[in-house]
Amino acid sequence: MDEDLGLFGPGSVTWKLHGEPILLLAGLRSLYLQALHPRAMAGVAQNSSYQQDPWGRLARTSDYVATVIYGTTGQAQTAGRRLRQMHARMRARDPFTGTEFRIDSPELLRWVHVTEVESFLTTVTRAGKRLTPAEIDGYYAEQRRAAALVGLDPQTVPGSAAEIADYYAQIRPELRMTPDAARTAFFLTAPPAPGKLNAPLRWSLNLGPARWAYLGVASTAYALLPSWAQRLYGTLGLPTTALYGDLNARMLRLALRAIPHSLIAGDVYRSAMERAARHTAAGEKPAQEEPAREKRPQTKPTAETIAV
């Protein structure tokens, strides 16, 4: 039985933060943000089937994140290797110049990574989770291990709140709302019901109370975006929008915390908790040392999924 606690473990800020169900909202926020990078969005639009199978892509992306956070080191490395191999063949064309580019460039990898982990942390803290400044910096530093899985050099990845802020300041001139970004934002706000359902149930999900509830979640995710990102989408980015996002996120977190965790936790999470419990029972203190990086042939890094 593999008792390895993975890349992070019980003593990490990562486990403390990722135990929050509100991260489902954070994932949606990150997708709105990622769509503002023209090349990143072109890579998705030209290579992804997310509009045909959004719920399947969401499930696969969630499984990947769960494996990286809670899987064993071997499981996380295997997931990262598969992701690299899957994206190594993908190319896209710049929407402005027509130049072909690899979607696995370090610049795109970094954008996806930063927007994802910053969305995770920002959403959780604005929803009411208290983290110290040291814990915030610790989370970003820990997530360099996840960045290494997709092929990035960890030393080139922002590892503190200050470095994240500097990164956004440097990349903002490259961001804009393209037609692909606008279509994606609309899709994220009003996705179709799963196609495998029967017609009456699809109609109910598309037009009934579930649709209005989802619109509330989507509007909250959008309201949690930085004001500069909201302005790129053509809205005002007023402080009242941020307040709306904060209040809704707090209420949603309270509602989700009322649901027994056993009902929403996945198999990877439950297995990780069982391994941690056995370590504790055996009197072993989980080590939080930087895990050895997987040895692999020297290839160009590959892209992290930008997917619903």
Image (cartoon, grey):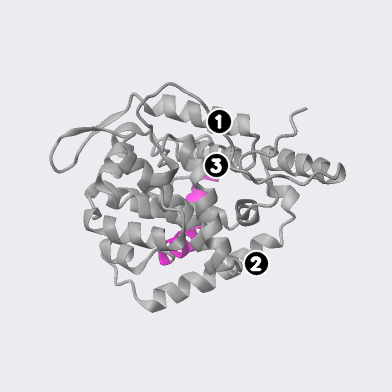
Q: Position of residue 185 (x, y in %)?
A: 35, 53
Q: Position of residue 7 (x, y in %)?
A: 61, 40
Give 46 or 135, whichever is nearer the viewer: 135
Q: Is residue 190 left or right of residue 60?
A: left
Residue interval drawn in magenta:
200-223
* Element assignment for label 3: helix
Q: Position of residue 12 (x, y in %)?
A: 64, 52
Q: In 3D space, how far apart are the residues under numbered discs 2 and 3 (Cα atoms)?
A: 23 Å
- Res. 77 mark: 1
* Element assignment for label 2: helix
* Element assignment for label 1: helix
Q: Residue at x 12, y 40 (%)?
A: 97
- Res. 65 mark: 3
Q: In 3D space, how far apart are the residues under numbered discs 3 and 1 (Cα atoms)?
A: 12 Å
**Number of marks present in the image shown:** 3
**Residue type at tag 2:** Leu
Dot 1, how many residues are within 10 Å of its Cα: few (below 14), some (14-19), or many (20+)?
A: many
Give 15 or 163, whichever is nearer the viewer: 163
**Residue type at tag 1:** Gln
- Res. 254 mark: 2
Q: Nearer the viewer, mark 2 or mark 1?
A: 1
Q: Nearer the viewer, mark 3 or mark 1?
A: 1
